[in-house]
Image: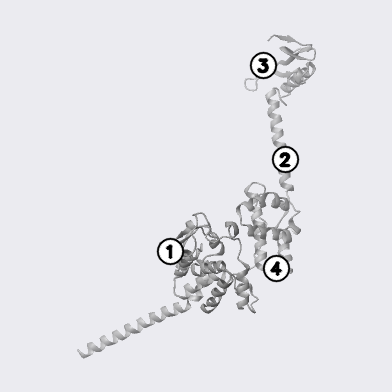
Amino acid sequence: MKWYKSNFPGVRYRKHPTRKHGVYYDRYFAIRYQRKDPVTDKPVRMEEGLGWESDGMTEAKARAKLEEYIKNAKTGQGPTRRRDEDRIIQEKKQVEERERQQKEQDELTFKDYFNDTYLPQAEIEKKAHTIRREKSLFKAWIDPTIGSLPLKQIGQFNIEQIKKKMHDKGQSPRSIQYMIAVVRQVFHHARGIGMYEGPAPTAEVKKPKFDNRRMRFLSHDEVNLLLPALKKKSELVHDMALFSLHCGLRFNEIASLAWSDIDLVRGILTIRNSKNGRTRAAYMTDAVRAILEGMRRGNNDELVFQAKGGKKIDRVSRSFDRVVDALGLNKGITDPRQRVVFHTLRHTYASWLVEGGVDLYVVKELLGHSVISMTERYAHLGANTLQAAVNTFEKSLKAKEQENQEEGKGQKLA
């Protein structure tokens, strides 16, 4: 296309062959000028296209841009080409975006992050009862103290405030520790996605010491009362209780058993949904095998124990608690750790094993504990076994001494 001179030196344009702008053909403006090459320091002729008149470019604007480039070339400051301008604009946008993000991060409150970012992710990864507990702690204790504070303004002092409030209101050490854990997880989550820098404000907060481990286990006489009473009340509850007592299973592990996990030939249950995420084997007793053989075997993906509609049973039946209360197994007991609950059956399984002389490492594997320290709570129950071992050792010493004495007498007679 042909170039035409404009009314301003250094500014020219060309006409679009068909497209019109108003009554005239649309015009594309360009400028021509000289500037020194920054490398060779020699004058270089430059030509820059600026745009169509239909997009807002005019002769006057083109002349103004030409004068700006010439001035910048002389002073060595500012853009001298269109691409320099584009780069500067882009860099400015990037700076503004970084500032916006930084401001957003600086003003992000604990409450907003907990509700909008942390919680939706946690609801995907964590169990329903865990989410309910975290929401409850947040609503009752965390939000009133630090919910409206930006993450970067929350420090150890704020967490200590929550600790004190919970302590003064009679909250248990376990609840206080749980609160600290929730706050810590939120900050770790924020740091993981770049919304927070530095250590969590819980890093130097001392956790209250407590021992909430349930140590109550049933005697054989108590079990002989409990199981028949459960069976009379609910065969389903009885069978699930027997699985826990005879195989050391947690409630959720029993509720999650599918028929594909049952191997009647080898007498093995495959536990896939364990607390620590690992798969392990549990071993049937004759009583467990008899229950399974008496049931209608479903498809591989069907649950062995089902709620209505084939759904998973999500909580221990109240029938269990009613039977326990009726038998008086918790009468006069106020310490939660000593009360009989469904989980007591698993503790009973472990306790009876240890009392029977089974090695703690074997008990650890049967229970699916991740570390031996979790199993060592039962170590004191093996005192009789240890005493028996010492007695055996002592007997061997005495037998050896007697043997040596008899050998000495024989030598004298010779």
Above or below for 284 versus 189: below
Q: Is residue 54 left or right of residue 357?
A: right
Considering the image in quadrants, where does the C terminus appear? Answer: bottom left
Residue pointed to by mark 2? 99
**Which residue is at the front of the view, 280 or 103?**
280
What residue is pinned by disc 3? 43
Q: Amino acid at mark 3?
A: Pro
Q: As shown in the figure, which amino acid type bears the numbered disc 4?
A: Gln
Please tell me how crowded label 4 is: few (under 14), some (14-19), or many (20+) other residues with Cα within 10 Å.
few
| Residue with the mark numbered 4 | 171
Q: Are marks 4 and 1 in contact (CB under 8 Å)?
A: no
For label 3, the SS is strand
Find residue 381 and report its horizontal and vertical position in percent.
50, 76
- If you read the primary sequence from the N terminus, does the residue marked by circle 3 or circle 4 appear first? 3
Across and down, in percent, residue 5 comes to 75, 9
Label 3 to label 4: alpha-carbon separation: 81 Å
Q: Is residue 272 above or below residue 392?
A: above
Query: For the N terminus, which image quadrant?
Result: top right
Mark pair 3, 2: CA separation? 39 Å
Q: Which residue is mark 1?
A: 267
What is the distance, in whole Å, between disc 4 and disc 1 at their CAs? 45 Å
Q: Are marks 3 and 2 in contact (CB under 8 Å)?
A: no
Q: Amino acid at mark 2?
A: Glu
Pinpoint residue 151: horizontal percent, then vertical percent. 71, 52
Most foreground residue, 48 or 188: 188
Left or right: 354 in relation to 411? right
| Position of 214 relative to 151 (above/below) | below
